[in-house]
Image (cartoon, grey):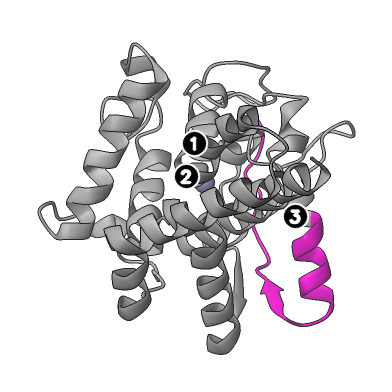
Amino acid sequence: MLVIITFFLCHWFLSLFFHSFFLHRFASHQMYTTSKNWERTFYFTTWLVQGSSYLVPRAYGVMHRMHHVYSDTEKDPHSPHFFKDVYQMMHHTIVIFRGFLTGKDLPEAQFTQEYLPVWDKLDKLGHHVATRIFFGLLYTAFYFYFAPNYWWFLLLPIHFLMGPIQGAVVNWCGHKYGYSNYDNGDHSKNTTPFGVILMGELFQNNHHFAKDDANFAKKWYEFDMTYQVMKGLHFIGIIKLKPLIIPIAQ
Ligand SMILES: [Zn+2]
Ligand SMILES: [Zn+2]
């Protein structure tokens, strides 16, 4: 049982960390710079830990930039205020994500002007259905081997869909439930205490106020775990956090 719980927590937090650290704070917002080798290392690790639910960075980055510009309007790819339930919101998100990936839909120029990390070979491999199934079989084999009984298999769908589930929680709760520190003209909220479990990603109200600020925590009781790791990586020279201009609070 301990092995399964450890596996689940490792998968949850590693997937979430690289989702936040690489897809969100680098691919979408360029909050830090790093060498090409480190960028490739983070890129590869993001694929490895997201596995069956790998989110291709360039499509994620474009979609997330749209989310900031059109936050909680009809052009927002995933505002909870335009959908009956989280499933419909995620279905709409996936359609837009796929549209960008296949080239069926072209993003507005404003969303591709800033740097977007691209690694075509890895994206083709990671996005391929056979690769996704392979990862799913690996998770299942692990449960077959270590789970004390079949009830634990109920956790498997979370492993299969880890990336989108974390995105759904952040986008649904972070724009619906919680408190606001700033008036951003949208519905972004800080959803504590889950901000800790989601490694800072649920401080949406703070993040929409200052989208280039790597630290999503603003009050003494808020804690952004991903930012703490980033400070460590900055300190040892692996990444370089960008200096930023903080907007004036209203
Ligand atoms: Zn948001
Ligand atoms: Zn963002």
Magenta highlight range: 228-250
Q: Which residue is mark 2?
A: 160
Q: Residues within 10 Å of mark 1 (few under 14, many from 20)?
A: few
Q: Is residue 103 above or below residue 148?
A: below
Image marks 1 and 2: residues in contact by CB distance under 8 Å: yes
Q: Which residue is mark 1?
A: 157
Per the model, the C-alpha gap separating discs 1 and 2 is 5 Å
Three-letter code, disc 3: Tyr
Residue 33 rendering spot, x and y as whole percentages: 60, 76
In front here: 101 or 242? Answer: 101
Q: Is residue 250 visible to us here?
A: no
Mark 2 or mark 3, earlier in chain? 2
* Along the viewing direction, whichever of 127 and 204 lies nearer the viewer: 127
Residue identified by numbered label 3: 227
Query: Going 63% across and 40% down the picture, which residue do you hit?
Result: 201
Give amino acid for label 1: Pro
- SS for tag 3? helix
Q: Amino acid at mark 2?
A: Phe
Question: Which percent across, then down, holds residue 51?
Answer: 48, 59
Quote the CA–CA distance across marks 1 and 3. 29 Å
| Residue 38, image quadrant | bottom right
